[in-house]
Image: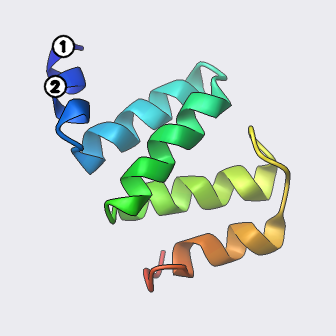
Amino acid sequence: KEARMKRIEANDPLALTETGKDAIDKGDYKSAFEYFSKAAELGDVGAHFSLSLMYQEGLGVEKDEKKGDQKPMKKGILV
């Protein structure tokens, strides 16, 4: 856990995405959204995909299938 926190502090997109997935598993959608958003800003494709699913399912965000479909394309990344 300590090693992952150091990676998060260093803005490691994979560590941010992994932590977002852990938050989803715990039902902490707010934290998951924050971790995925940061990782997506850093270009992590998995984070883009996870954000898309959150919008499609309305997990911690207002359900928006249109936004969910567009999120992975926002930065030209195909998922």
Q: Nearer the viewer, residue 21 or 40?
A: 40
**Callout 2: SS:** helix
- Residue 45 position by quadrant: bottom left
Q: Quadrant of residue 27?
A: top right
Please give left or right for residue 66 compared with residue 27 in the image.
right
Q: Is residue 9 left or right of residue 26?
A: left
Compared to residue 58, the image places residue 41 above or below, namely: below
Where residue 34 sits: x, y (%)?
Answer: 53, 40
Name the residue that disc number 2 marks: 6
Residue at the (63%, 23%) spot, across then down: 28
Q: Amino acid at mark 2?
A: Lys
Marks 1/2 in contact by CB < 8 Å: the verdict is yes
Image point (59%, 18%), residue name: 26
What residue is shown at x 80% (from left), y 74% (from top)? Answer: 66
- Residue 78 against residue 26 in the figure, above or below: below
Q: Is residue 5 left or right of residue 73?
A: left
Quarter of the figure that contains the N terminus: top left
Q: Identify the residue position indicated by label 1 in the image.
A: 2
Residue at the spot x=55%, y=53% of the render?
50
> Looking at the rendered structure, which numbered label has been put on residue 30?
none
Numbered disc 1: secondary structure: helix
List x then y, in percent, for residue 9. Answer: 22, 31
